[in-house]
Image: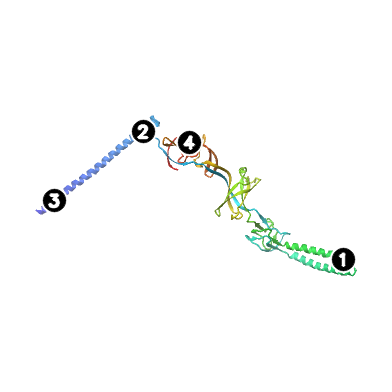
Amino acid sequence: MHKTLKIFTLVIALAVSSCGAKKTTDTVTEKKAKLETLKKQQQQVNDEISALEKEIYKLDPSSKPEKAKLVAVTKLLPQNFNHYIDLQAKVDADNISYVTPRGQPGLVKSVYVKDGDYVKKGQLLLKLDDALVKRQIAQLQTQLSYAEDIYNRRNNLWKENIGTEVELLSAKNNVDQVQKQIELAKEQWAFTNVYAEKSAVAEEVTIHVGETFSGNPQAGGYIKLVNTSDLKITAEVPENYLGRVKNGSTMEVTLPDVNQTFNTTISVSGRVINLNNRSFYVDAKVPAGISVRPNQLALAKILDYSATNVITIPLNTLQTDQNGKFVLVAVNNNGKMYAQKKKVEVGELYGDKIEVKGGLADGDMLITDGFENLYDGQLITIGGS
């Protein structure tokens, strides 16, 4: 009997469980069906709203709500503006010379200097062949000894009242003549030593032993001396800046290889236009204490225009229409921000900044981002500055 009761209880429990699961399944299905019905109703309402808006806008265009466009603005403040002429320049030596022999060209026997050596004034640089002049001096010394012997004999005879005064004077004249020839030969011998005429750096030494040295770079080997204590910046300025660059103009120089910048002023402005590139040259002294080398690359910026307390704007914000140049600024009207078109008069341009001579004022809110396709009077919202 107990076994029969357990089986009956189990059957009842399974029946109850089955009914609960069925009821839960029916509830989820009903909710999903109801959700789909609501979605269809929502879409139908949205379509009706959209259709009504279009119909109303056709009947009354002013009734369409305007969507504000996001922009960024910058408050304009007066500042100093400088315009520069950007040029490629180089470091040059103000005092460059080529060593030349004091006499005739000669065969090089010894070279006492090399590229890059610092030489002092009077330092021996070259020794030229002196064999011929030494032989000449030796011969003249022999002639001098002979002439002096003749003179001494004539003088002794003259003291004994023998001979004539003319013979004595002639012998003395021969001695003087040979001595002068020896002095001249010794000067020529000195010319075989080539000395530095000034203290400088031997920038280029291209002469070698066995070559003929004349000092002319076009004729062969040479020695180039550069005074590195007197250097300058030199550049070529286009002809159209002729009236804006003069002696005393400020020049900012950058040496890109050593990342060094310094200021100087133009000391020499060329008076002749180069026919090949329609430019004129300018020179500016390198200030003391600046370490540079001849022929070093430099970038020069010559200040040719300066204005104080002026309005400048980024070049990319400047636009043009049939009426001229304009920019867009943000203005507040009854608590809402609108774009306003302002016609401007511009001046000089340097880099990405352009000078504004009229049309804008201190405190104007220039639209610097989002101005593309923005029209006068459009509603805006400011998202950055």
Among the two numbered marks 4 and 2 on one chain, the one whose residue lies closer to the N terminus: 2
- In percent of width and height, residue 253 lies at 58, 50
Q: Amino acid at mark 1?
A: Leu
Tell which of 22 and 297 is nearer to you.
Answer: 297
Q: Amino acid at mark 2?
A: Glu
Q: Residue at x 87, y 66 (%)?
A: 168
At numbered mark 4, what does the secondary structure look like: helix, strand or loop? Answer: strand
Q: Please give the residue where the numbered disc 3 appears in the rendered image.
A: 9
Q: Position of residue 329 (x, y in %)?
A: 47, 38
From the image, state whether disc 1 or disc 3 is nearer to you: 1
Taking 153 as reference, is 113 left or right?
A: left
Of the image marks 2 and 3, the number of the one nearer the N terminus: 3
Helix, strand or loop at disc 3? helix
- Residue 145: quadrant of the picture: bottom right
3D distance between C-alphas at marks 2 and 1: 141 Å
Q: Which residue is mark 2?
A: 53
In percent of width and height, residue 45 lies at 31, 35
